Every structure is written in structure tokens, then in C-alpha cells.
Image: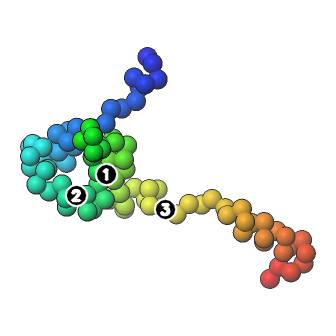
Amino acid sequence: MARAEMLMPDLKLSTVARLLGFASERELAGLLDEYLARGMPAPDPITRRIDPVAFERWRRLRAPHLFPELCETSAALDPRRLWAERRAAWRGDAA
């Protein structure tokens, strides 16, 4: 299978409507502005399709208590701060 074939295609609005529990795209269309205001990824202006990964991430972020790993701040160290702390320790001016 070619690499491009393994990519998930963008979602049609009818598929997004079904995933959100609507019977039709028309039902979603009436509430689309409200969903976009709540952070749902906007459809591509040309294809009118939504990135499936962005949609799934948005959907999961609506329940942060179920997916806390999506809401946690990064545990990565700030290299500038780390360097400043180590340099201060080497110089003997660490608090």
C-alpha cells in the first residue's frame, strides 16, 4: 500500500454530522457556527471537508476529565532556564 493511501481522507460534513449524532448534514448546518465557536475545526474553504485528526482531537477535548493527557501542560524542560540554573550553580550563586 502506498504511503498516500494510508492517510485518512478529510471528513465530509455529512460524516461529521453523523459522528456528532445528527441525522443529516442539514441538521448540522444549522448549528455549525455554534460548533465552530466552541473550537470545532473549520471545514477547508475549497473542499468543505474537515481534517479527521483535528476533529477527533477537538471531540476528545470536550471531555478533559476523560482525556487529561490532551490538556496537561508540557513536561519539557526550558533549555534557557535549565542553562541559567546550571550556570548559577557552577558559579556558586544558586539560591
Query: What is the secondary structure assignment of the residue under circle 2?
Result: helix
From the image, state whether disc 2 or disc 3 is nearer to you: 2
Identify the residue at image location x=90%, y=78%: 92
The residue lying furthest to the front in this view is 46
Precedes in sequence: disc 3 or disc 1: 1
Res 95 → quadrant: bottom right
Query: What is the secondary structure assignment of the residue under circle 3?
Result: loop
Circle 2 packing at 10 Å, graded few (<14), some (14-19), many (20+), is: some
Please indicate, yes or no, whether residue 36 appears anywhere in the rendered image. Answer: yes
Q: Decide: marks 2, 1 in contact (CB < 8 A)?
A: no
Please indicate, yes or no, whether residue 59 appears anywhere in the rendered image. Answer: no
Residue 73 in picture, x, y percent from top left? 52, 63
Residue 15 in picture, x, y percent from top left? 20, 38
Direction from residue 1 to residue 18 in the image, left or right: left
From the image, state whether disc 3 or disc 1 is nearer to you: 1
Instruction: Give the distance between the C-alpha atoms of the residues marked 2 and 1, in whole angstroms.
Output: 9 Å
Q: Which residue is mark 1?
A: 41
Residue 74 in picture, x, y percent from top left? 56, 60
Precedes in sequence: disc 2 or disc 3: 2
Circle 3 packing at 10 Å, graded few (<14), some (14-19), many (20+), is: few
Precedes in sequence: disc 2 or disc 1: 2
Identify the residue at image location x=84%, y=70%: 87
Q: Decide: marks 3, 1 in contact (CB < 8 A)?
A: no
Q: Which of the pair 39/47 is nearer the observer?
A: 47
